[in-house]
Image (spheres, helix red, strand yellow):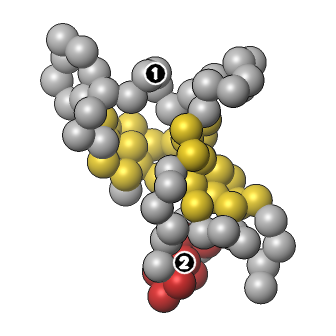
């Protein structure tokens, strides 16, 4: 689960997990480039196996003038498995 206490720029369509760096990237729209967010917080090594074993992730976020919203998106693994 990912929780944002500030509004995201748009709905997330998928999350990519970069195994070699243990970082997430939020992908907002498949048709638009360079509008994605790389999360600059490395997943702790002992927690990375749990991340790699899940096919989806729940995003819980705020949107202007709306109640907080939770929704499920695919979690895509990028890179080699160690």
Position of residue 13 relative to residue 64, above or below, is: below
Residue at 50 percent across and 55 percent down: it is 40
Task: Using a 10 Å C-alpha cutoff, classify the residue at mark 2 as few (fewer than 14 neighbours), some (14 to 19) or many (20 or more).
Answer: some
The residue wearing badge 2 is: 48
Residue furthest toward the front?
A: 40
78 left or right, relative to 65: right
State how far apart marks 1 and 2 are (Cα). 26 Å
Residue 71 visible (yes or no): yes
| Frontmost residue, 10 versus 1 | 10
Name the residue at 54% across, 77% down.
Answer: 48
Graded by Cα atoms within 10 Å as few (under 14), some (14 to 19) or many (20 or more), the crowding at tag 1 reads few
What's the residue at 53%, 84% (across, down)?
A: 45
| x then y, percent, for residue 21 | 66, 68
Residue that carries the numbered disc 1 in the rendered image: 10
Q: Position of residue 23 (x, y in %)?
A: 58, 61
- Up the image or down, 43 lies above or below 30; here it is below
Most extreme residue toward the top is 65
Q: Position of residue 54 (x, y in %)?
A: 55, 66
For the C terminus, give its image quadrant.
bottom right
Q: Which mark is residue 75?
A: none
Identify the element where label 2 is drawn.
helix
Q: Where residue 24 sits in the image (x, y, percent)?
A: 56, 55
Can residue 50 be spotted in the picture? no
Q: Quadrant of residue 78?
A: bottom right
- On the rendered image, what quadrant is the N terminus found in? bottom left
For the residue labelled by badge 1, is the local secondary structure a helix, a strand or a loop? loop
């Amino acid at each position: 689960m990912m929780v944002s206490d500030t509004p995201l720029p748009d709905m997330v369509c998928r999350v990519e997990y970069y195994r070699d760096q243990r970082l997430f990237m939020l992908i907002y729209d498949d048709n638009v480039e360079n509008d994605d967010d790389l999360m600059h917080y490395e997943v702790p090594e002992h927690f990375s196996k749990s991340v790699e074993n899940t096919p989806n992730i729940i995003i819980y976020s705020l949107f202007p003038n709306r109640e907080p919203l939770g929704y499920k998106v695919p979690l895509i693994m990028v890179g080699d498995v160690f």
